[in-house]
Image: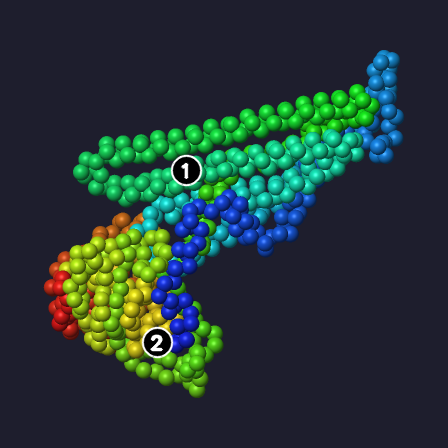
Amino acid sequence: MNRDAGTFHIKTDRQAGKTAGWKKNPGERSAKKGNAAGRRSGMAIMGRLIGLVRPLWFVIVLAVLFGSAGYLCAIFLTILTAGALTGVWLPGSLETSVAAGTFYEGVSSGNVMAAGSVLLSVLPFLLGLAVLRGILHYAEQYCNHFIAFKLLAILRHKLFAALQRLCPAKLEGKDRGNLISVITSDIELLEVFYAHTISPIAIAVVTELVMVRFLAAFHPAAAMLAFAAYVTVGCFLPLWNGRRTAGAGMEYRNTFGDFNSFLLDSFRGLSETLQYGRGPSRRDQLLSRSVTLGQQQKRLNQMEGTQRALNGLLILFFSLAMLLLTAGLFQDGSLDFSGMVLCTVAMMGSFGPVTALSSLSNNLNQTLASGERVLAILEEEPVVEELPEAETPDREGRRTVPPERDGSQITFWEKSGNKTSVFDGADAKKVSFRYTKTGRKTAGNASMYGMEESVCGMGASALSDKERKGGGWILKDFDFRAEPGQITGIHGPSGCGKSTLLKLLMRFWDVDSGGVYISGEDVRSIPTAHLRAAEAYVTQETHLFHDTIAANIAIGRPGASLEEIRAAARKASVDDFIMSLPKGYDTEVGELGDTLSGGERQRIGIARAFLHDAPLLLLDEPTSNLDSLNEGIILKSLKESGSGKTIVLVSHRESTMRAADTVVEWKESGAGR
């Protein structure tokens, strides 16, 4: 955003009714998705994950070619050795110039030199295949991991963008530990899928088709038995094991995420745990959760052991079956002795690719569960869809421009030029709004996360107890006006929906009916970037990032100079405190601002808002953590520095309302002035 000292530019789009921004139920589509019907199938998850590989298909093809050639080198290493020992290299017309029977004749006659010459003639080829196998395997793994780590980076960016799109409405009340688990460990587990699943499947298909064709050159029956063996070990076994372990894998990933949330919660509440002597109780809960997690892991390990045992049993069974089949063919003259040996050796040595597929099902139970959790976030619909900046004029001729401001004016740009007008306040007209019991918006919105807020009648009839319990109206046919250039105070008891009004002004949520307006324009028609640039919002709990104090304040205006930051801090009555610190504005605030008190954090949040310099300032309990002295200083600063600004000041403190030009009293039964 361009923040030149001038006017504040904001662009509206009156055609927004045709966009998602006007939809009353933007989350409705997600309710109809697979999440509503339960967990999607493993094949569906794999299909969605494979779809992300399309930009890198050429690398996938290289990985398949290198992998198939590498496996064939390993397989034919044993086949050529067996061929040399039996007197042939390859079947039929592919016989080499090495004389058949030379090795056996040399051994039986005691001519060691003759026998050794056969092995020496084969040795260079065997060494060449062994070296080539190593090179090809390295090339395959390089391609696979290039794809995996490239896609993991892309997925992290997509996931972060999805979280930005979903917040704040969909992330209200969401377990932070679970989200961290998705972003970190779940994403990391997808490396197994991209590096060790996609190309191995194609490699197994290509390699085993070559082997079936090779065995068909000896006898069709040998080829059919090999085909049945490959399909059983590489297809039926992993599918059976995947279905058997899918539920356990998802259960383990969810339990792991909950365990992370519990640990994060325990660390944050460490002082309270110690103060009230709850250490033993917390430790017992941690132990219980750890035991549960260990039991689920043990169950998965047992399933993996069963799969590995069955895999080995099937390989032995089909190898023995090939030996018995070729022995029978040898007895009736359909196959010579060398063919019997080569077919059996080829079968025993060619299970590598399908064994890798079979073993994948052990890891895929958790990998696909992680993929489901990641895809669920990527596909989740936001409660409020942001309105992008239009690149073309709307039907009234306005076009988007970079937001600029001087803290008191708002600008609309016309085809013929720009038109600047003084910021004309904020309104709520006939607004009705409610959350559902689970925190979802009503009328079918499929929010996964949310919040609950007790209900309080505001400018309308009193609400029943039934309405107050999850899903009741927070605002009902509510009207509100914040006059331009004035401080409008909203005073009322905690939980009656004062904060909800500010969130509607910020368009964190959309109303069920009625409208919220900024300078006469419906907030649903204003591009989100312009709307947020027009407003500064100070919440009850100021979040500080693990960075310097200067960097935390500068969030309000990226690129602001230190002098501008200090000027904002002085208005928030925090400059003297910051300068008293050894490193001043370069002081690190620690994780979540733990090195600062609640009042100090709150004043830094207010300094951000002053630095943002928006025409509309929304303050939600801005002095709740301050003593009377600092409260008085900040309120005085609001009066002095807020000249020309429209300020909505929310508080349950009567002392805070002294700074307001107009006070709106919200009571249990309604609202009044």
Instruction: Indicate whether 609 appears above or below 123.
Output: below
Circle 2 crowding by C-alpha within 10 Å: few under 14, some 14–19, many from 20: many
Kindly report the distance in space between the C-alpha atoms of the residues bearing marks 2 and 1: 52 Å
Image quadrant in which you'd find residue 639: bottom left
Which quadrant would residue 296 be assigned to in this image?
top left
Res. 390 mark: none
Q: Nearer the viewer, residue 252 or 455?
A: 455
Up/down of 354 relative to 391, above or below: above
* Residue under numbered circle 1: 252
Q: In the depicted view, which residue is nearer to us: 546 or 188? A: 188
Q: Is the residue under label 1 in contact with that under label 2 (CB below 8 Å)?
A: no
Amino acid type, label 2: Phe
> Helix, strand or loop at disc 1?
helix
Question: In the displayed structure, would residue 573 be above or below residue 324?
Answer: below
Mark 2 secondary-structure assignment: loop
Where is mark 2, residue-wise? 8
